Image (spheres, rainbow, N blue to C red):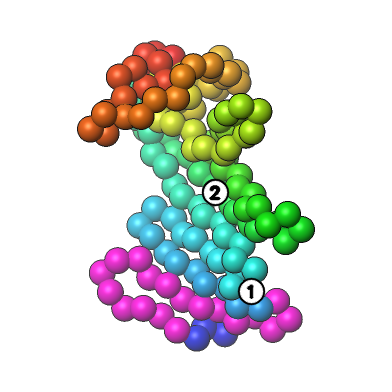
């Protein structure tokens, strides 16, 4: 049952009430959608990603999910990207023994095409603050 919808030029949101399951807010974007389970705050976002590589364009799906663990109070997050040939990659950054999820990049060693060619990538280095939105060197050179 559809209950409400925002009308504007930006993302559109609709609430669905499903008997026995609860309320779901679905927000649609140009390149994907986000679904939030209202009762728990669990969220999943699905995005379509296009990448230009070696003269061609490939499409990927990026999935970002989060939920709050009621026992610990921590929010758990998972981010993955995959192609339509069965390749799926996750990303995480480990700082002093604690792991944090991240999104796979579209350049350097973490470009999905590079990871498909070379396998999983483990990169070790300093985390630096970008200056004016640009970080020299990124995750490596454009070739991986």
Q: Can you say which quadrant of the picture contains the C terminus?
A: top left
What residue sits right under mark 1 in the picture? 39
Is 128 contained in the magenta span?
A: no
The residue under the point 39% across, 39% down is 50
Q: Which mark is residue 127?
A: none
**Residue 64, above or below 1:** above
User: Considering depth in this image, is 35 or 130 the residue closer to the camera?
Assistant: 130
Query: In the visual, does 121 lie left or right of 70?
Result: left
Q: Is residue 22 above or below residue 97?
A: below
Observer-nearest of 101 and 44? 101
Point 42% across, 42% down: residue: 49
Residue receiving disc 2: 64
**Disc 2 to disc 1, how far (Cα)?**
19 Å
Q: Position of residue 98 (x, y in %)?
A: 64, 33
Q: Secondary structure at mark 1?
A: loop
Q: Nearer the viewer, residue 128 or 64?
A: 128
Residue under the image location 76 percent in, 58 percent down: 71
Q: Is residue 105 above or below residue 120?
A: below
In this image, 94 relative to 127: left or right?
A: right
Is 9 displayed left or right of 2 in the figure? left
**Of marks 2 and 1, which one's residue comes earlier in the chain?**
1
What quarter of the picture does the N terminus occupy? bottom right
- Dot 1, how many residues are within 10 Å of its Cα: few (below 14), some (14-19), or many (20+)? few
What range is drawn magenta here?
A: 4-21
The secondary structure type at the circle numbered 2 is strand
- Position of residue 10 relative to residue 87, above or below, is below
């Amino acid at each position: 049952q559809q209950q409400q919808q925002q009308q504007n030029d930006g993302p559109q949101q609709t609430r669905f009430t499903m008997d026995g399951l609860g309320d779901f807010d679905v927000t649609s974007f140009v390149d994907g959608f986000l679904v939030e389970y209202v009762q728990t705050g669990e969220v999943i976002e699905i995005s379509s990603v296009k990448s230009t590589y070696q003269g061609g364009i490939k499409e990927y799906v990026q999935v970002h999910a989060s939920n709050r663990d009621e026992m610990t109070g921590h929010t758990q997050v998972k981010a993955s990207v995959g192609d339509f040939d069965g390749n799926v990659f996750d990303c995480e950054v480990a700082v002093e023994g604690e792991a944090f999820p991240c999104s796979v990049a579209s350049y350097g060693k973490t470009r999905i095409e590079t990871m498909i060619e070379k396998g999983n990538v483990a990169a070790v280095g300093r985390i630096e603050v970008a200056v004016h939105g640009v970080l020299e060197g990124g995750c490596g050179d454009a070739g991986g």
